Each structure stands twice: as C-alpha cells, then as structure tokens.
Image (tube, coloured by chain):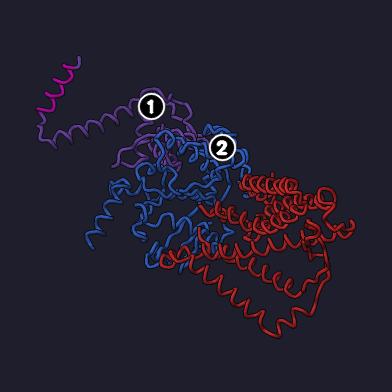
Amino acid sequence: MMNPIKGLLIKDYRISRFHFLTWVVAIIVLLSFGVVFSAYTNQPAGTFFIFILVGISIVGIAPIMMLSLLTIEGKNQLWLYSPRSSYTLLLSKFAVILTYQFIIQILLTIYGAISMYWFGKSVYQQLSTGMFIELIAVINIALLLTGIYFTCWLIFYWSIYHSLKKYPKIRPFRWLVIIVLFFAYNLFEAFLIRLEIVKNFVSLYQLNIVSNTSLNYVDDEWNVLFDTATIPITPIIYYTLLAFLLFFATSRFLERKVEV
Amino acid sequence: MTTEFQSSKPIYMQIVDRIIIDILQEKQILGDKLPSVREKAVQIGVNPNTIQRAYSELERMSVVETRRGQGTFVIENSHLLDELRLSMQTEVINEYVKKMKEIGITKQQMISELQHYLKEED
Amino acid sequence: MSILMQDVRKKYGNDYALKNVNLTFQKGKIYGLIGPNGSGKSTTLKLITGLIFPDSGNVTLHGHTVTRKTSVDIAYLTELDMFYDSFSVQETINYIASQFSDFNRNKAELLVKEMKLENNKKIKSLSKGNRARLKLVTTLARDADVILLDEPFSGLDPMVRDQIVKSLLQYIDFDNQILLIATHEINEIEPLLDEAIALYYGEVIGQEKVEDLREQKGLSVLQWFKQIIGTIEEDN
C-alpha cells in the first residue's frame, strides 16, 4: 500500500507535469535563442541578458504553477475531502513545484557555466571555480526563496478568495477584496521602510557576497563583470517570518473557512 | 433485474407472495434452501432488512424454517402446497369480488361472466 | 455508533440552506434523504462529512464534533465530478487507496470487474455512466463507518442504476455501516430504504419507516411525500 504522502506527491505531480514540461520547453527555447542571437550579432554577452531575463521569469514559475494546481483543485474543492491536514496538502504542492523550479534553475546554471567558460569566455570576467559556485549557490537559493515567498502570498490570497465564496453578497466583489488587501499591505510595507528606526535596523547586519554584476562596453564589445555586494539580513528574516505566517494562515483558512 | 413493487402493499408482503408463487410453480422446491438474505436482497434489489422481515413472515406462516447456521429452508410438507394454493386462491377471489362489487356487478353476473370468460378462453 | 445533528442551521447569505435540523442516524440502516433539488440534501451530507460547517448547532459522529478529519470515517460520493481528468481508472483508485487507510483493495478489484471498468482508461474518456460507476467503486470499496451517497443515480439509464443498486447491496457491511442516500428519485430508491426523511426548503418535514408507511397508511414514500408537501402548501 502506497503511503499517503507519496500518494499526494504523485497526484500533484500527475496533474501538473504537462504544465511543467511547457515551462521547460519555453525556457530551453529562450536559452537557445540567447546563444543563437549572441552568435549572430557577435556579442557573446547577449547570453548574459537572456540569463537575467530567465532568472527573473523563474521567480514567476512557483506562483503560476501553484495557481494552476489550485485552479484544478478549486473546481470542486474535493482535495479538501481528505484526512490529511491542510499543511500536508499544501506542502505536497510546494514540494512538487519547488522541484520543478529547481530543475529549471539547474538548466539556467548549466547555461550560465557554458556562457562563462566556453561560449562567452572572452567577454565574461573569469571567476575562479570557487567563486562561481558561490555565485551560483546564492542565485539559486535566492530564486527558491523568492519563489516560496510569492507563492505564500498567492495561496493566502487564493484561500481568502475562496473563503468569501459562501457570502453571496460579497461574492461578486471578491477580486476587489484581494486587490484592496494587496495595496493595503504594500502601502504598509512602503511606510515601514521609510521609518528611520527600520532603516537603521535593516542596515545593521549585512552579508558580503558576489552578486553584483554589470555589463561594460569596451572596444565594440559588451563585457560582463562581477563585484561583491552586501545583502541586509534583517529583511530576509522578516520575509521568512512573513512567508511562514501566510502559510499558516492559509492552512487555517483551508481547514475552517474554505467550504466544499 | 431489480423488481417493481405496487405502492399500496408493504414490500415485504409482496416478497412473501412472490416466494409463495415460486413454491406453487415449483421454482422453489419443497425442502430446499432459500437464498441467503443478502443474496435475495441483491437479486431483487431490496433492503436486506425487508428480506429478513419477509423470511420471518414466511416462518410465522410455517412455510419456511430457519436452521441455525444453515439458512432458511422451505418446509418439506406435502400439505403445504395445498394450503398455500388455497390461501392464495381465497385472496385472489376476495380481490375479484371486491373489484367487481366496486363497479356494480351482482353476484349472479359475476358467476355468469366468469363462466362466459372461461368458455371463450377454451 | 451514530450521527447526530442538533439544531443545525446553515445559511448562504440570507437564504437558509438548512433550518433547525435535528436528525439521528443509526448503524445497520439505510436512510433516504428525499426532497426536490435545493431542499438541503447536499448541504446535509456535506455537513456530516465536514466539508462545510454549520452556522449554529452541532453535527457529531460517534459523539465527536465533525471536522475535516472526520473524512477518515466517512466515504462520501458527491453529485459532482470528483476525479482528476488526466488520471486513469487505476491511478484514481491508487490515489484514493493511498489517502484512506480503510480502502479495501480486494473490494475495489471486484467492483471494477463487476462494473466492467477498464483500469487503463483515462477519466476524461469515460462515459457519464462509467464515471458514476467509478465514483461508486471508490466509495463502496472503503470499509468506512458511514457511507453518504449524493444523487448516485442522477442522469443514469435504468441498466446502470440497477447495477449500482445491486453492488450497493452486495458490498455494504450492514452490521457496521450507516448508509445515507440523498436523491430526488424517490420511487427508484424506495425498496432500498429503512427510513425516509423528507426535506423541503431546508426543513425536515417528515421522517417515517418505509414499511410502516405502507402497512399503516397504505402509502408509498412518493405518495407520502406528496401528501405532506400538499398539507404544507395548503397552510401557506
């Protein structure tokens, strides 16, 4: 007998694998285009532009995949007819989606390595293997964390949206509620950042990493340079806590408020 | 096939009637075992509690007996067939007379109509 | 071992889906929840399964308030499509078996054979009748304390309906299970029932033992139902 966690994982994989393959194909096409176009224009640094573009779009993969999974489940909400806790139901989806995202990140990493050490050797500032691994690790972790963070917001909004389904009067305005929530939080965050005390606190702890990159135009050729940069620790902790909070709130909503 | 039932009579009684007719037509042999409650329920598409009740009724009428751990059997009694036939007969005649009276047929007419009908049939 | 509903109310906006419902269900019996569409039958089943929650009142199974976790003990067949389109019959069964520990694989295999379902067929290519059959397979294969069927016959031709009735009778564990069937097809279901409960606009308007109705009042369930609705509408 298959255990329940494995059963859930297989289910979530089965209902999303086609969507995942679409992503993979799209990204491979985009990456190949980067190489072809850079070769055609004799500007090997063009691959760097594509690298950044794909890197940014990866942040959208997890939330979009989650939305597509939840849309399938939301048709009848019978995924909630389960002895598993809401945490487990959600975590299974996270596990599958983050695996997908990680696989796509591996593609991007390989692309980065090829660009730097082979295709774009002449224009990329050559980093030592150690530095390269550090850079790649930081980028991968940052992408995963950002993906998790946005996905937590997504499930939170989704669960509120569906909790409101049972109130026929609010039902037509559910989108509005979500939009108001979105702006309210972002205003709050903008306000928070402007506070002097928060500013000081944010710059209190910093971490040095190689993450600053730049394109330089020298002798008719674009070059890619790397520099060290600092990351403030406090916001990372804040966003991590916030993500946890959103996740637990969502689970509660699913268990108590979202009706089938 | 699940069976249709009339709406006015208890279902268990309709099942009792059917089993009796089966015995009279020798589809159900004297001394033989009736299907289990579950089998019979599945066969005719009826709640097992209703079948149980029909079997109890048959037992009360001394048509069947329940042997512990073996099931329900039709009693092996040669008079049984005659008795059942007689009681069914009475019931059918009752019904006939009642219906005929309802539509205003006299006793004389009933007999003559029946004789006429039977002649036609031959 | 019973299901208890005490003063249960459920509102959607200003509309009552259920109003002061008090019901008890005991094991070893088959109950029919009858009434027209929109009378609160589905709401009642969902409340018992813990898929929705009452605005006031209590729903308990074996003395414990029903929550989402109660699905451990309740096999629920929805009137909606309940499977993933991209799954095959076998994958669907495997998935449900993995989620519910009371899922009886032997029963499921027998049922699949009896219902003449093909294991490798995709859900999206199944006919309506076959989907209904599969729903029944996954529900009846569970050795759950409670089996709830929401409109198990709706839109099915009489052949499929007969087969479903037979499988139901064959695989239900009468001594240990509570079976509750919600339907508006009253005549079709009557021979299956011990008790009929009539719902009308969210209220229980009658509850009778089916054979008592016939024996004492000479009424079938449908006749009884029409009669009580008649008296209610006269009063209004």
* Chain letter for the residue marked with disc 2 in the picture: C
Note whether A194 is above or below B93 in the view shown. Answer: below
Q: Residue at x 16, y 16 (%)?
A: B120
Any magenta on residue B109?
yes
Give the amino acid type for the residue marked by disc 2 in the picture: Lys
Q: Residue at x 16, y 23 (%)?
A: B114
Give the amino acid type for the residue marked by disc 1 in the picture: Asp
List x then y, in percent, for residue A223: 80, 58
Q: Secondary structure at mark 1?
A: helix
Q: Residue at x 59, y 38 (%)?
A: C88
**Crowd rating for badge 1 (residues with CA inside 10 Å; few <14, some 14–19, many 20+):** few
Quarter occupied by residue C38: bottom left
Chain with purple colouring = B
Instruction: Tell which of B11 and A253 is nearer to you.
Output: A253
Seen as rendered, the residue at the extreme top is B122
Seen as rendered, the residue at the extreme front is A219
Residue denoted by label 1: B22
Give the main secondary structure of the magenta stretch: helix
What range of the chain is rendered magenta?
B108-120
Q: Secondary structure at mark 2?
A: loop
Q: How far apart, in angstroms, are the residues tagged by discs 2 and 1? A: 45 Å
Q: Quadrant of the N terminus of chain C?
A: bottom right
C51 lies left or right of C208: right
Q: Nearer the viewer, mark 2 or mark 1?
A: 2
* Chain letter for the residue marked with disc 1 in the picture: B
Any magenta on residue A3?
no
Residue denoted by label 2: C122
Chain with blue colouring = C
List x then y, in percent, for residue C55: 46, 68
Q: Residue A8: which numbered mark, if any? A: none
Q: Residue at x 13, y 24 (%)?
A: B113
